[in-house]
Image (cartoon, rainbow, N blue to C red):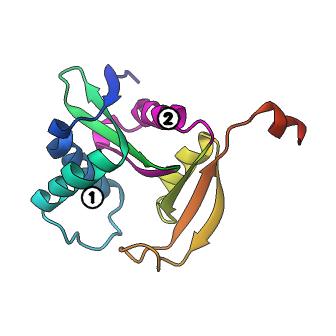
Amino acid sequence: MTTAPFAVRAAVPADAAAVAHVHVASREATMPYLPPRRRSDAEVEAWVRDVVIPGSAVWVAVDGQDRVVGYAAVAGGHLDALYLLAGVLRRGVGSALLGAAKAYRPGGLTLAVFQRNTGAIAFYARHGFTVVDSNDGSRNMENEPDLTMRWQPVTNSTRTGG
């Protein structure tokens, strides 16, 4: 498999429309079991511009033409989002974005993932995340059962048990 060149950089407000597009397109392509979305494209873009980018650490993956093909957002110690366009899945883009998030929060991260999103669960497990909690869906607006996963970096004290 060949990999198209891409770069990861910090998101800027001008990326809002592209990030919103990735968010919507990724969810529609990879999670067909979700209920129909309730927000218009303009509402999703406003949310990204007014809430996500100013309130989180956000990175975008861009292709050789500087088109946004994925993004990740961290608020506090929680990975709120990691979404990719379908055409760049399994090409290292998600791993690079997750690497940026881990570098930003080297003490550890948590995330929530739908239980039916088995591809994402496997991806996060390959990157050292473990399941620490499950929920019946009552804590998310989709009412979809989810898992909480945590990445805790391995340190000398965790290797030796002390």
Q: Which mark identifies residue 109?
A: none
Coordinates of residue 82 in the picture (x, y in percent)? 40, 46
Coordinates of residue 47 in the picture (x, y in percent)? 21, 57
Q: Which residue is mark 1?
A: 28
Q: Is residue 158 left or right of residue 72?
A: right
Coordinates of residue 33 in the picture (x, y in percent)? 35, 69
Q: Which residues are magenta?
A: 78-107
- Pick whichever of labels 2 and 1 is earlier in the sequence: 1
The amino acid type found where label 1 is placed reads Glu
> CA separation, marks 2 and 1?
28 Å
Tell me the residue at 61%/44% (across/down): 108
Tell me the residue at 19%/30% (across/down): 67
Most foreground residue, 103 or 124: 103
Q: Is residue 136 magenta?
A: no
**Residue 44, above or below 156:** below
Q: Which residue is mark 2?
A: 104
Mark 2 neighbour density, 10 Å: few (under 14) some (14–19) many (20 or more): some
Q: Is residue 80 magenta?
A: yes
Tell me the residue at 59%/35% (across/down): 106
- The mark closer to the camera, 2 or 1, is 2
